[in-house]
Image (tube, rainbow, N blue to C red):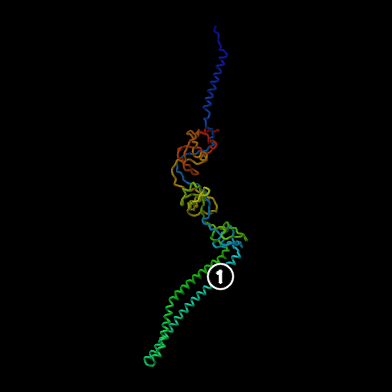
Amino acid sequence: MDRRIEAPWYVKRAYRAGGGVAMLIVAGLVAWGLSPKAGSVNVRTESLTFGQVVRAPYLDYAPVRAEITPAQTTFVAAEASGRVESAAAGDGDRVTAGQILARLSNSQLSLDIAAREADISARISDNASRLMAIKAAQESREQALADAAHALNKARQELEKRQVLLAKDLLSAAAVQPYADEAAYQRQRLAALKAAGASDEAFYAAQRTQAAQTAEDLRRNLIEARAGRSALTIRAPASGRLTAFDLKPGQAVTLGQGLGQVDSEDAYKLRAQIDEFYLPRLAAGQGAEAVVHDRPVKVRVEKVFPQVANGRVAVDLVFVGPTPADLKRGEAIDLRLSLGKPQAAVIAPSGGWLSDTGGTWAFVLTSDGKRAERRPIVIGRRNPEQVEVLSGLRPGERIVTAGAQDLLKAKTLRLGSKG
């Protein structure tokens, strides 16, 4: 009868050990196949934000924050030194051109002005006396000419009478001769006065012109002297809103000191500080769009200041059309300053990913949407809403735009419902 032969115990143990090792190897291979590859990270899909790459017009504009400023500002300055005697207006008041704002007192200035006025008045009186003397001399010369002409006419009449009597032998020639001599004398006298009259007239004309010019200069000096007194009265240089004006009685004021300003009302412009990066692309006439009090408004660049301060360039803009109502000085307005016409391009949405990656790469979703792989890209222009993609992305692809700031060292993001 046959008998079953059993394997030795050590052979059974070897078979069992080999089977265990084989099972461990298979389990390891399965685990390796299922584990993430090097550089990949599991991420919850809902923790990320995605954006679509499209082909669309690129809107070439710069975001600008501008401040409402008065269209015209006129400064108030002291025209004389003194102390504030009284203030008739205050900061924030609406004023009209010429309105008294304050009065100053300066006793020394008042005395100096009074002395100057008295001196000018005396010189004006002397000049008037000079004009009267010139006039009297001219009238005296004219009277002398008239007297000489009259005397000559009278001498001729007397001579003619005697000559008639001489012709009738009623008088002798000796009796007539004195009358002939008198007529000759008056004739010479009149001729001499007329000859001198031409040069006298030129002299008197020059004297009158000089005296008139002197009188005009003195009157101007008197006006200026009196203006020195009026300089103690501070007046509004224009109509508008008085600002930065805060004079108190007794306060000392010096000549030329700035005391405030008058801002035009209902006429405003915009002042913006723009990054110097845009300076080569800024020019007067460029258009911009804004939303003021929930209404779209068009503006244009009026002036670009060439100076660069702290990396910023100042730009003045004006409203195209009527100025919006209810504007306040200092109010901030956000603008979209147009830098060029829209051009078709491959566009990706702007977002935090640009600052995270520097715009040199992006996480791009695979077609099955299960992974986002790191891919190098090249970008061009950008604005707050769009970024121009020069290479690396195609229209229709999706990229991670936010939520991956802590995963920048990863090469692949494995997307799922659990992190």
| SS at circle 1 | helix
Q: Residues within 10 Å of mark 1 (few under 14, many from 20)?
A: some
Residue 319: horizontal and vertical position, in percent? 49, 53
Q: Residue furthest left?
A: 167
Quarter in which the N terminus is drawn:
top right
What's the amino acid at mark 1? Asp
Residue 403: horizontal and vertical position, in percent? 54, 38
Q: Is residue 139 above or below residue 239?
A: below
Q: Residue furthest right?
A: 250
Can residue 383 be seen? yes
Q: Residue furthest top?
A: 1
Quarter of the figure with residue 113: bottom right
Residue name at image x 50 percent, y 76 percent = 133
Q: Is residue 219 above or below residue 19?
A: below
Q: Which residue is mark 1?
A: 119
Residue name at image x 51 percent, y 74 percent = 130
Residue 281: horizontal and vertical position, in percent? 46, 48
Q: Is residue 93 above or below residue 413?
A: below
Residue name at image x 57 percent, y 14 percent = 10
Quarter of the figure with residue 236: bottom right
Between 275 and 369, the residue placed more toward the observer is 275
